[in-house]
Amino acid sequence: MNYTDLLALRDRTAPVITAADGGFRVVVGLATCGMAAGAGPVMDAFKEYTAGMDNVRVELTGCIGICQYEPIVEIYEEGKPKVTYVKMTPDRARRVVEEHIRGGKPVEEFMLTENGKPAYSIDDTTFMKKQVRIALRNCGVINPEDIDEYIARDGYQALRKALTEMTPDEVIDVVYKSGLRGRGGAGFPTGLKWKLASDNRGKVKKYVCCNADEGDPGAFMDRSLLEGDPHAIIEAMAIAAYAIGADEGYIYVRAEYPTAIKRLQIAIDQAKEYGLLGQNIFGTGFNFELSLRFGAGAFVCGEETSLMTSIEGKRGEPRPRPPFPATKGLFDQPTVLNNVETYANIPQIILRGADWFASYGTEKSKGTKVFALGGKINNTGLIEIPMGMPLREIIYEIGGGIPNGKELKAVQTGGPSGGCIPARLIDTPVDYDSLAAIGCIIGSGGMIVIDEDNCMVDIARFFLEFTVDESCGKCTPCRIGMKRTLEILDKIIDGKATEKDLARLEELSDYVKTASLCGLGQTAPNPVISTLRFFHDEYEAHIKDRRCPAHVCKRLVQFIIDPAKCTGCTKCARKCPTSAISGKVREPHVIDQSKCIKCGVCMDNCAFGAISKN
């Protein structure tokens, strides 16, 4: 494909995205989140009910963003704002077709509400108004399985510009000046990484790799990008290959992401068919081949050297650095490795310029960041915000606050490698340096909200247990040190620890952090270190008072029956699985703590509020 053909295809296809052909465009969110909520039958229903209507196109799209309202359907009509419908079902689809598409009147009861009124479009909600979408610009907008729709949104224009108007060094210079830092967690300057790998172009074999081995609990940023906009990643990798002098690349993606894998392969095949991958791209003599490689679910393979070792067909274990991958990476050749979100920014940076991208964010953290917002929050989903936005704005405006009137306790960022930010620091700007200053990290972009009902010792244990299971076992500090750390946390939660154990916990965490071989071990103690720093009183309550303030740790919880409230209905006794409750009919009952297994069934079944945790 030449430049003229690309422009002609873009101009011909662009009106299709906004239904400017005089009809309706119905898009159904068919990312993993949508499919899990039942979007497949909704898609089938729209196709069935619009069959024979020549002015209606029904298409799939990626993640629209506000995931707890899936399945989500959006309807575009020429000359009118799009309309967003949430929690769709096949029956609701029938009504939308009859009343909106045929009757011309949108169905307000199926919409989101904002300030008590229907929000016709998700774009009219605070959830979206506060966002700036660069990496996510096409997610929920285009059909990710149709290259023409990507091209309609200026797709592959950045690759064309780089190959025909810029030298490789100019490409690197733009990326460097944009201030883009790696979105995979470390935050290393992307342009600098490319510069280090660019030496000896044409003289040695080089590779470009994409880390799509997203494994953090609660993280789904990369998956959503791959499912919603796979061509952006392909285009960016081709630009990176041109910049450093590579002609071959690999996307290392988790095998647990079948939809992402399917759409990536479709996108690669389409790009090859259009001449946008392969030989002599845009007639410039530049060649680039791209392949997929699948991870088997090892979290450690998210670390760059482990990932490349896995691509080579070996056991996924980290290698000592230096040498760094930019000089000796995949198959011992110079390699650029960035994660999915980092690449997703590249085409727009090339098209719009370094200054445009750098106009967002802070002095040292430029651009935007995608987060998977989850936990105890009203609006869960995928968000993209300018770097430097205060945490308060994210939680209470975009996220809609904490459900059920509960108090915010902490926000956990960075997945198993991250830390917990206490509620008192809620005005902290979310950028690399501000979070580092309080001992936390952005990481790849997980953001889990924690309320007053969560125990911070239990939270630390949850993440540490994950990293203990995922350790490759190569180095002693990680293999042994984290296991011993987990054992101390178990003692604390069971009410068997002493103050000496607490001091040992701090010592071990510091040892693992400073002595481990790779990033997994070096960051694994972060949840423990941050909770010890900000929630030390909870650790002391577990150890000194044998009490869990949040009433979460079962061995430190007692279920107590208030005799003033107990009517002697016997329901709790009948439901108790261990016969720990005794008492006569119409007389107050008691719980034998030696038999109680802390299951909470009694409290769940008490109709009089007589049972409480202590």
Image: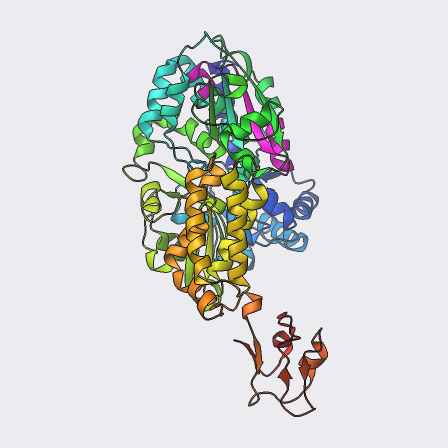
- Does residue 536 appear in the picture of this structure? yes
Where residue 331 sits: x, y (%)?
Answer: 54, 18
The outermost residue toward the front is 500
* Front position in the image: 60 or 190: 190
Q: Please, is residue 231 above or below residue 542 in the view? A: above
Does the magenta segment cover residue 247? yes
Applied colour scheme = rainbow
* Front position in the image: 287 or 498: 498
- Does residue 84 appear in the picture of this structure? no
Give the residue drawn at x 47%, y 66%: 542
Where residue 199 sits: x, y (%)?
Answer: 39, 13
Where residue 226 sits: x, y (%)?
Answer: 55, 34
Give the residue drawn at x 48%, y 67%: 550
Does the magenta segment cover residue 465? no
Q: Is residue 468 left or right of residue 135?
A: right
Q: Please, is residue 144 above or below residue 452 in the view? A: above
* Front position in the image: 492 or 339: 492
Q: Is residue 75 left or right of residue 535?
A: right
The outermost residue toward the left is 363
Give the residue drawn at x 50%, y 27%: 319
The outermost residue toward the bottom is 586
Where residue 585 sits: x, y (%)?
Answer: 70, 91
Highlighted range, magenta: 239-267
* Front position in the image: 314 or 109: 314
Question: How many circles with numbers are drawn on the protein?
Answer: 0
Give the residue drawn at x 61%, y 29%: 315
